[in-house]
Image (cartoon, rainbow, N blue to C red):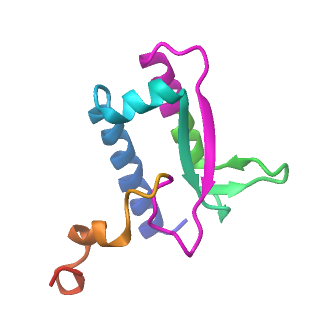
Amino acid sequence: MSRASAAIFAVAVLAVLSDVACAQDGPVMKRIAETKTITIGHRDASVPISYLGPDGKVQGYSIDICLKIVDAAKEELKLDKLEVKYVPLTPQNPHSAPDGRYRRHDLRDFDPPDRRLDR
């Protein structure tokens, strides 16, 4: 894995972890508690980050981290069972969250100033 990929992965993990920390009493945790379901977006062929294994199951570093977060959410919400749904992220929808809330234009603050869409 290149240094750039490792850095991007580290930032993504920190962003996910900070969202979970902020979501403990928010609408996300309420929705998870009500539906007893959590959705994880994944890539099919981004080895070793996220990929489909020979058995057709989703695996990889990011999936392992997401499943730790699922366990923490299940414990926090005192749920016996929490269903995990996997949604593939494709080149056609690379910046979409599984629920469709985030789009490329929502990420413009993270672009370099000369590439921002709002200018």
Q: How many marks?
A: 0
User: Compared to 80, does 58 lie above or below?
Assistant: below
Residue 94 colored in magenta in the image: yes
Q: Is residue 114 left or right of residue 53?
A: left
- Residue 63: % across, % down: 59, 45
- Asked if residue 103 is positioned above or below residue 52 in the image, the reply reads below
Q: Residue at x 84, y 49 (%)?
A: 55
Frontmost residue, 88 versus 18: 88
Q: At 29% across and 66% down in the image, what residue appears?
A: 106
In the displayed structure, 104 sits above or below 97; it is below
Where is residue 14 drawn, in percent x and y? 35, 46
Position of 54 relative to 2 (above/below): above
Furthest residue to the right? 55
Left or right: 73 as drawn, with respect to 114: right
Position of the C terminus, as image quadrant, is bottom left
Q: Quadrant of the N terminus?
A: bottom right
Residue 64: % across, % down? 58, 40
In the image, is residue 82 part of the stretch drawn in magenta?
yes
State the extent of the magenta-drawn residues as a range: 69-98
Residue 92, given in percent of the width and then of the height, sits at 55, 75
